Image (spheres, rainbow, N blue to C red):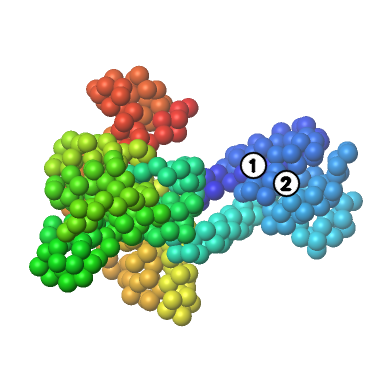
């Protein structure tokens, strides 16, 4: 539940007229109400993940309000329960308060009295759920791999990772700079049977063409000037584990030819020898651009792209999963506080606005650095005006800007057409196959837009 979502209320009263009137009162106050005339039906709708408030009458047949409160207490003692009482039930209600009930309200009650109590209880519950999510995220990320997020896109990504981690299939990961591509690659390795092998990472964009071939394939002593001793290449070193090739779109053309053979034959020939060495290889490649788009692919070999593209995972940029920003910020701030041996400062309204309004062009990496500066007291949000849309776009490479705008247009068109594929395709003026390819590339789920 986010701050913008209406708080949920489960309302129980066996008096149908009072149930209807109370439900109307709470709905007019902006709450999402589920009303029940029988306590057992309300309990069936409750679980530990319920993010709202329970409002119940005390005197009811079969299961009364106090018994219901006891069962909710056992289910989750942090679910706020508000008891509605007659004058004769006040002593019982007071005891329930001592046992942990959130509030009791006597009949007849003013509408504002109930609405205010529910609002306070809902805020308390929201904070409890946020803290739980943060703790769970911290536990999930205790090995330093924070693939944190509660948005549907991140849920789907984690489920997909679990499904394919142990399959040995080669994977292509796409996403903007700082979105967490190496995190995904590392999790694929750790969640697979290859976890006991080496996780070997190479950024293809940081090595000159004269070096990358030796780094990947290795060499024998004397293979070239300066090769004084034998070197095992990254590919061979990753045998039995996982090879992560970041910014693969930057790989030189000559190396792409050799890499294609490695992928097809699962063998490597080091420089300076004719010896062919088999390798037990799994490759996770990452790209900042859409290699499926000929314009963005540029000089990257099409056959190598199709050989790598067995499974493609798209990591959504942070601006497209804004509900995850507070959770990630909390995690990074806690981690920074432990590292710098400082307490986490109180989050001001200006910082909260910045978290919600900033576009985060540097994605998770930028947010992590922001959290570190915040903990150190070096971030003066008040004196830093928010960047304009033009300024935000200016810091992004052109392919990423085009990709971002294309995704926004598709989402907007899907929303305008209630997720209807035919109308959306007609409005966009693209073939059906292209439409589905773009949905997959941008991580867009059509059903999210259906009414």
Residue pictured at 34% horizontal, 20% vertical: 423
The kind of secondary structure element at disc 2 is strand
Name the residue tied to disc 1: 26
Vertical placement of residue 322 versus 329, above or below: above
Return the residue nearer the eye: 173 or 50. 173
Q: Distance between the Cα atoms at labels 2 and 1?
A: 10 Å
Residue pictured at 37% horizontal, 64% vertical: 368
Direction from residue 136 to residue 393 in the image, left or right: left
Tell me residue 284's x, y (percent).
Answer: 34, 49
Mark on residue 292?
Answer: none
| Residue density around tag 2, few if under 14, some if 14–19, many if 20 or more, within 10 Å | many
Residue pictured at 40% horizontal, 60% vertical: 198
The kind of secondary structure element at disc 1 is helix
Mark on residue 55?
Answer: 2
Asked whether residue 364 is in view, the answer is: no
Q: Quadrant of residue 229?
A: bottom left
Q: Are marks 2 and 1 in contact (CB under 8 Å)?
A: yes
Residue pictured at 77% horizontal, 54% vertical: 74
């Amino acid at each position: 539940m986010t701050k913008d979502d209406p708080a949920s209320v489960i309302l129980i009263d066996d008096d149908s007229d009072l149930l209807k009137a109370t439900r109307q009162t709470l709905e007019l106050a902006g709450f999402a109400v589920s009303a029940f005339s029988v306590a057992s039906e309300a309990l069936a709708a409750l679980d530990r993940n319920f993010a709202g408030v329970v409002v119940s009458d005390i005197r009811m047949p079969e299961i009364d309000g106090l018994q219901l409160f006891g069962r909710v207490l056992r289910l989750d003692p942090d679910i706020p329960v508000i008891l509605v009482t007659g004058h004769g039930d006040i002593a019982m209600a007071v005891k329930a308060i001592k046992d942990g009930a959130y509030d009791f309200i006597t009949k007849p009650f003013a509408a504002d009295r109930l609405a205010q109590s529910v609002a306070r209880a809902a805020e308390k519950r929201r904070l409890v759920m946020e803290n739980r999510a943060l703790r769970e995220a911290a536990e999930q990320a205790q090995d330093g791999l924070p693939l944190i997020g509660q948005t549907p896109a991140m849920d789907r990504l984690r489920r997909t990772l679990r499904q394919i981690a142990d399959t040995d299939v080669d994977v292509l990961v796409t996403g903007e700079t700082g979105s967490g591509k190496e995190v995904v690659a590392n999790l694929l390795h750790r969640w697979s049977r290859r976890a006991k092998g080496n996780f070997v990472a190479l950024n293809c964009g940081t090595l000159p063409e004269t070096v990358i071939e030796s780094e990947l394939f290795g060499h024998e002593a004397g293979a070239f000037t300066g090769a004084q001793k034998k070197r095992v290449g990254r590919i061979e070193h990753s045998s039995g584990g996982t090879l992560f090739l970041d910014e693969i779109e930057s790989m030189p053309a000559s190396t792409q030819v050799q890499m294609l053979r490695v992928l097809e034959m699962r063998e490597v020939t080091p420089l300076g020898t004719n010896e062919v060495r088999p390798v037990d290889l799994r490759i996770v490649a990452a790209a900042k651009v859409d290699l499926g788009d000929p314009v963005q692919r540029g000089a990257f070999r099409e056959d190598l792209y199709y050989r790598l593209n067995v499974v493609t995972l798209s990591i959504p940029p942070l601006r497209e999963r804004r509900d995850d920003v507070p959770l990630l910020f909390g995690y990074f701030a806690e981690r920074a506080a432990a590292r710098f041996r400082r307490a986490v400062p109180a989050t001001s309204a200006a910082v909260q606005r910045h978290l919600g309004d900033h576009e985060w062009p540097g994605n998770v990496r930028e947010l992590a650095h922001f959290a570190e500066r915040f903990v150190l007291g070096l971030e003066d949000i008040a004196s830093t005006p928010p960047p304009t849309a033009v300024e935000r776009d200016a810091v992004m490479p052109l392919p990423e800007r085009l990709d971002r705008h294309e995704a926004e247009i598709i989402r907007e068109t899907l929303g305008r057409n209630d997720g209807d594929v035919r109308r959306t395709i007609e409005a966009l003026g693209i073939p059906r196959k292209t439409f589905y390819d773009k949905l997959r590339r941008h991580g867009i789920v059509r059903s999210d837009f259906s009414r």
